[in-house]
Image: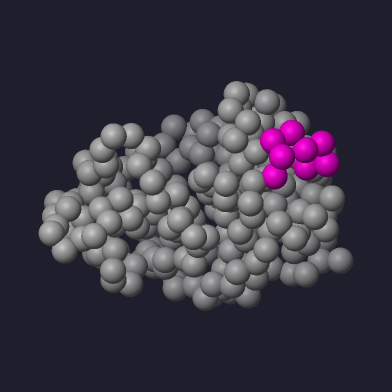
Amino acid sequence: MATGLPAEGTCQVWWTPAARPDDPALLALLGAGERRRHATFGDPRGRAAYLTARAVTRLVLAGMLGTPAPELGFEAVCRQCGGPHGKPVLRSPPAPVEFSVSHSGRWCVVAFAARTEIGVDVERIALRGDTLPLRALAPAERATATGPGVRDRTAAFIRYWTRKEALLKATGDGLSVDPATITVTGPDQPAALLRWDNTSTPADTPHLTDLVAPTGYAAALAGLGRPLVVSYHDGGALLRKGI
């Protein structure tokens, strides 16, 4: 039975711990192209994250639309080159619902909204290399993240990064836009866009929100055109029920 789309001006955020990397019940929910993509991940953690995020996306949309999860059709088109590697969108059945997916470490997050372009990002608060990639920050952000008053530079950087990544997902630009050309508020301030110095500017006013995330992680949501009221949902319970 269809539950209907989220009310306009709201966003559902589904948190899910990564499932087994080759769970046959979850693989049965995916389309042929998704299964081929899943098979390309050599790292079991990558396969698990991809499978989990795609399965949750399908099950949530299936519940909203009353369509069996395996019958949903998606398409991804790059905003820059038109190639099949851009932001995924639902094509069948047609519905005014937008979604965005992110995963890091052992957690996946999927966000859903109606008639609003959105982007979500989650990152584990940890270094991926020997140093922080501060070149991704605008000058004012870099000064704040490395200032003497900052006790955890990694956490400050990750807060900046999740906000920027969520925004660039919402606009569809991805990393074709240099994150250093975007300035957001400081890590201890409410999330907001301060400056967009790139020539590719958003058509609608961006709104940013820091999400409640699992311990050791930071996450952010971006919506274009309107602020969004966020509700949180248990994707793990959905997977157990759905399969």
Residue occupying image coordinates x 31% and y 43%: 177
Task: State whether residue 16 appears in this view.
Answer: yes
Q: Quadrant of the N terminus?
A: bottom right
Give the residue at x 14% y 57%.
Answer: 147
Give the magenta part as a residue range.
Answer: 19-26
Kindly identify the residue that appears in the image at 61 percent across and 59 percent down. 15
Q: Nearer the viewer, residue 67 or 105?
A: 105
Front-lying residue, 79 or 206: 206
Q: Is residue 223 visible?
A: no
Q: Quadrant of residue 230?
A: bottom right
In the image: residue 71, left or right of residue 153 = right
Q: Is residue 200 left or right of residue 236?
A: left
Does the segment drawn in magenta span residue 20?
yes
> From what the image shows, is residue 191 above or below residue 34?
below
The image shows residue 20 at horizontal and vertical percentages of: 71, 40
- Percent x, y of residue 242: 82, 55
Residue 164, position as x, y percentages in the image: 35, 53
The type of colouring in the image is one colour
